[in-house]
Image: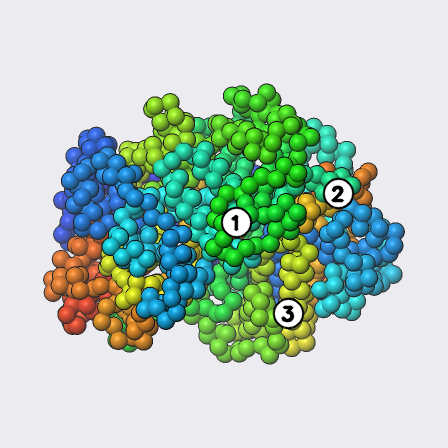
Amino acid sequence: MAACSIGHARYLRAFMFFAAFAVIGNVGAQVASHRPDAGFHYGFEAVSAGPFNDGDAARFLTQATFGPSLAEIANLRTLGYSAWLDQQFAATPSYQEPFLDWVRGLPPNSPSGSSSVYQQQRLETWFINSVGMYDPSSPPRVHDDQLRQRVALALSEIFVTSDRNGMLLFQPWALGSFYDALTRNAFGSYRSLLQDVTLHPAMGIYLSMAGNRKPDAALNIRPDENYAREILQLFSVGLNLLNLDGSLYMPSGQPVATYNQTVVRGFAHVFTGWNFNDCALSDYDDCGYYNGYEPGMRQSMTSFETYHDNTTDKQLLKYDTAVLPNGILVHGGTAPVELTKALDNIYNHPNVAPFICKQLIQRLVTSNPTPGYVQRVATVFNNNGAGARGDLKAVVKAILLDVEARYGHYSQGDRYGKLREPMLKLAQLWRNTVARSSNGRINLIYDPAESYGQAPQRSRSVFNFFRPNFQQPGEIRDLGLVSPEFQIATDSLIVSTPNDLEFRIFYNYIGSDHWTAQDPDTALMDLAPLSTLAAAPATLIDRLNLLMLSGQMSPFMRQTLLTRLNALPNANGGRDRVQHALYLIAISPEYSIQK
Amino acid sequence: MAVNRREFLRRSICSAMGGVSLYSALGSLRLVNAAAQSPTAIFPDYRALVCVYLYGGNDSFNMIVPRDNTHYNTYAASRGNLKIAQGSLLALNPTAAGMPSDGAQYGLHPSMTELAALFNSGKVAVLGNVGTLLYPTTQAQYNSVGYPLPPQLFSHDDQTNYWQTSIADDANANGWGGRIADLLYAGNPNQNLSMLMSLSGENLFQRGELINQYIMNPFGVQRVDYLDEYLNGPGATAFNAMFQQSSQANVFERAYAGAMNSSIANYQAIDAALTSSGDVTTVFPESSLGGQLKMVARLIKARNTFNMRRQVFFVSIDGFDFHSTQLTDQANTLADLSQSLKAFNDAIGTELNLGPNVTTFTASDFGRTVSTNGDGTDHGWGGHHFVMGGAVRGQRFYGSMPSLLQNGNPDDAGYGQLIPTTSVDQYAATLATWFGVPGSDLATIFPNVGRFATANLGFLNP
């Protein structure tokens, strides 16, 4: 007990590697193990081959979607990883704007509910698109672009906008349309993504590039540095020079800053002369915010040369391969021309690949990718194999088909994986139980940010709900690991999330007589299919183990759940057992860590 | 947070060995030694530090504004259309011993009537132009190549980190609230409750080596409902089995289970204490900050039930990053700050009669530029702050007030980003000394404070 956890963990890691192959014979042994069930593997398969069993398929889908279903597991096993990815790349994208427009157009007293559009409606369409729920705005449609939606969410946590901003609070279309821009570019080029993000009115409001103006020495006015600083720090290159593998470049033992204040000012000058596309030049200084549904809130900002600085040379990023000599953009260009050159200057910086790729890996797969993993994906970012840079489709493919995504849970044992984002627990539960409301609308009843500490585009600041380098104090920090999602696992939220899940599992299912379940817009889980399995608790647990834990449930946890369910009469057509099983799994430490 | 001294030593050493920074390792070891040697006596009195963090970087140059003609004209010329009208400023009338360093007369933003009254009645002091520094820094030094400066100046999260660690040359440092707790936690009779409580989410200020923050929401603590359901004993048994401390196979699973167990244990203690000690009667604003400060007042009211003698609280208010529409928006935010602080002062000083036992102070990412971008300001560096409480030697200005000249400003790092003339180390060390950190341990908690003229700015009575 007195041993330092560092040495202890090293021992565990070695043990895990062995255990991964040894555990098969242990299932059903006298002392139930806490180690994950490893499934069956030869250990020599090619990475791109497979999946070889349902657990493999479910595990892949856990990283690539909002949660596996039996049908998708079967589909993936039929197609194989590569063809499944191609199918997803080709799937019709789901967008938020059409839903918001549909709601706005609802007649009075419509059975489809109110025509009011607030941020809540943006969350409705997010859940419908991400969970793949029945969509009342286009009834026959089933949203099946799971991978695209999953990547879009990851991008929304890097290219952050938020309705916690006082001016965006009343602009659901701006934020919905911004999310759509992320969705549209999720498999496109990072360069296009950067452009669309930069010129989107939601970002223009959030980081105040809309209305940014050239210097006026007499009035002591100089360009707004907000967007200039954050596009560098958060959306592209980061604060310090990186090696291709994501580690800090430290030629003399110290980090080297990627840019300085002069560079921030250079970009701030470039980003002058932009405003909403229906803004009148005479209103440039004070372009009011429009009714949310108008074009100015949904379409790219437009340039106003009167307010663009064309008299100063701009110091941009300076690096060996920079096209601009010494990173200096000589004055005189129009706002769009300078914007193009400046975004190219960012886009081609060698930091972009490791900086963006590592965060995407963290969002989809594991909190602590090895340098090798980051480097392999970053290499694909720099060249997709056909000479193209910034191809996000190739990057996503590289992330999911990497040996570390597919087999890292064996090679890294007890430190692999990530804390699931709390909100995604609800999304997966709804997906598992094909939840829908009677009129198709989704009244969330409570603000998810209150119980889950997050909701799409609702973080406290541009620094997202959590930072990629956050280290939970204790063993995680002692081991030098990072654990981003733990930053919102506060004493309050670690309890409020299970409580909200309990409420929804035990009161919001089809057939519930709870008052909240009577509303036509309450999402109700369909527990009937699972309930038919409840007569044999082991069968029910095996099913949920596959869907929620990719078959990785430890023998100990399985035994614990079996004991619980066996002690529960198989009442209400099996529903009682299903509810307790869903809850106990959803809040369990083993499920909470996606491995 | 039940830990004994031996566990503290073990974990600190483990952490030091696992750390990536040499300073962190040495710093932790020094702290371990200091803790081992510091008196274990229980503090006889109660003291609390309350950090009010202004997220986003407050524009304090529009909050505390020169109002005599000469200085106002300089300010107005620099601020252009972002200036606050001279006639609307609320006069601050310092005592003779507390005149501002520049001889100017100052006023508060017109939305801060409560805070102006608190200053003029001696409950509040102003600390001028404080910020992150590695060494005392002049304009010439700032402009010279290689002079040591805090990394990533003007960046929100980096400067927030350095304000909260006060060690800008160590990216791995704990927060200074956390380090104080590591040193002093043994002086609390109750060793099971964290002496660090946040009402506003996870923060670096309260991250210690072994004392970690308890993070609750302003509306109270929550139980795990499932564990209390009628006739759900077997359900609770299954829950508890899965969360059995340290039994999980994966490091993240263990951390998750540990966080859950800690939350459950703290819920029971805090809920019982809050219930038995009851609400405070002082009316607080309905704002987020008002709610947070009200809960802090309730927790302080329950101090004897908790059996706590030293506590550090963290509350915050969002939205100070006014790059645009600053004039209208900052007025609302400052009004909230002023009204919430007033209510807290009433609750602590009048209702609970604990004025001299509780010191409240503001902190923020940075000050803002004296220059503007038309309808907002950008990220600056130094800025002014408030200290409030019965122990404060109030109605005085501390530190030095910077020039607000647009051109030829000796404090300007460029664009009106003002170089701080007082360091966060000095500010924090003054608060820590009042809180009970012995002078002999000050350099352990604040390794850089010796580089500055004084470790005690004198704004608190002992």
Secondary structure beneath dot 3 equals helix
Residue A448 can be seen, yes or no: no
Badge 2 density bin: few <14, some 14–19, many ≥20, Cα 10 Å: many
Mark 1 = which residue?
Answer: A296
Label 3 – label 2 distance at C-alpha: 38 Å
Q: Is residue A406 left or right of residue B292?
A: left
Labels 1 and 3 share a subunit = no
Labels 1 and 2 share a subunit = yes
Residue B88 appears at what percent x and percent y?
Answer: 79, 63
- The amino acid type found where label 1 is placed reads Gly
Badge 1 density bin: few <14, some 14–19, many ≥20, Cα 10 Å: many
Disc 3: host chain? B
Residue B173 appears at what percent x and percent y?
Answer: 55, 44
Residue A536 can be seen, yes or no: yes
**The one of B184 and A283 positioned closer to us in this rendering:** A283
Q: Residue at x 11, y 62 (%)?
A: A536
Badge 3 density bin: few <14, some 14–19, many ≥20, Cα 10 Å: many
- The amino acid type found where label 3 is placed reads Phe
**The one of B145 and A344 positioned closer to us in this rendering:** A344
Mark 1 or 2 closer to N-term? 2
Q: Which mark is residue B344?
A: 3
Which picture quadrant has residue A126? bottom left
